[in-house]
């Protein structure tokens, strides 16, 4: 079974999670949809799509990738994940809001994997927002490796 892990990242957390998933799903191929927007999903049985949420939304190129490949994704074993600092119902709501409803309903697994606040990677405006709105004044590493492991089990 061939697996593609397609992702879009702002500051690296989603890529880090994709790499951890790849380690759990031996042989999976990583695809940054910003670098390969026309990546061919046809040869893959399983497709996992992940994106980072910032200001309530995933990156535009990930939304476009899902829309362009919508029909093909219905034919695949599909997984969806996000990276965000929310947890519980709020994080689950973010997943539902950032992927088309029919893909969300068709997915074998959906989850959130936490996130990373690395203030050095944020631009000036982002740092101000993070400090004022989220009250974050120092770096935070909050990747949920246990959630990644449980998610990966659904695709073995």
Image: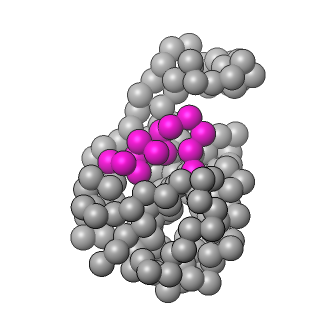
Closest to the observer, 122 or 44:
44
The answer to whether residue 110 is visible is: no
Q: Nearer the viewer, residue 129 or 73?
A: 73
Protein image colouring: one colour
Q: Is residue 91 magenta?
A: no
- Camera-nearest residue between 152 and 47: 47
Q: Name the residue located 67 percent from the left edge and 50 percent from the top edge.
A: 59
In the rendered image of this protein, does residue 127 appear above or below residue 89? above
| Residue 9 falls left or right of residue 60 | left
Give the quarter of the image for residue 78.
bottom left
Q: Position of residue 126 (x, y in %)?
A: 69, 25
In this rendering, position of residue 139 left or right of residue 17: right
Residue 39 appears in which quarter of the rendering?
bottom right
Q: Split into 4 quadrants, where in the image is the N terminus?
A: bottom left
Whether residue 78 can be seen here: yes
Res 9 quadrant in image: top right
Seen in the picture, residue 14 relative to 67 is either above or below; the reply is: above
State the residue at coordinates (63%, 77%): 70
Tell me where residue 18 appears, x and y as whole percent.
41, 51
User: Is residue 136 shown above or below 115?
Assistant: above
Residue 50 percent location from the top left of the image: 51, 56
Residue 22 shown left or right of residue 139 in the figure: left
Q: Report the span colored magenta.
A: 8-20
Image point 40% across, 33% down: which residue? 142
- Was residue 14 drawn as part of the magenta stretch in this picture? yes
């Amino acid at each position: 079974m061939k697996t593609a892990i397609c992702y879009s990242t702002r500051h690296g957390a989603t890529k880090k999670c994709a790499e951890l998933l790849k380690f759990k799903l031996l042989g999976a191929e990583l695809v940054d949809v910003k670098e390969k927007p026309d990546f061919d999903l046809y040869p893959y049985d399983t497709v996992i799509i992940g994106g980072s949420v910032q200001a309530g939304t995933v990156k535009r190129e990930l939304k476009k990738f899902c829309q362009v490949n919508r029909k093909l994704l219905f034919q695949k074993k599909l997984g969806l994940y996000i990276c965000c600092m929310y947890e519980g119902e709020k994080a689950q709501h973010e997943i539902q809001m950032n992927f088309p409803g029919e893909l969300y309903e068709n997915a074998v697994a959906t989850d959130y994997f936490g996130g990373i606040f690395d203030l050095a990677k944020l631009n000036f405006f982002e740092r101000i927002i993070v400090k004022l709105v989220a009250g974050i004044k120092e770096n935070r590493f909050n990747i949920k490796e246990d959630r990644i492991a449980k998610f990966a089990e659904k695709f073995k």
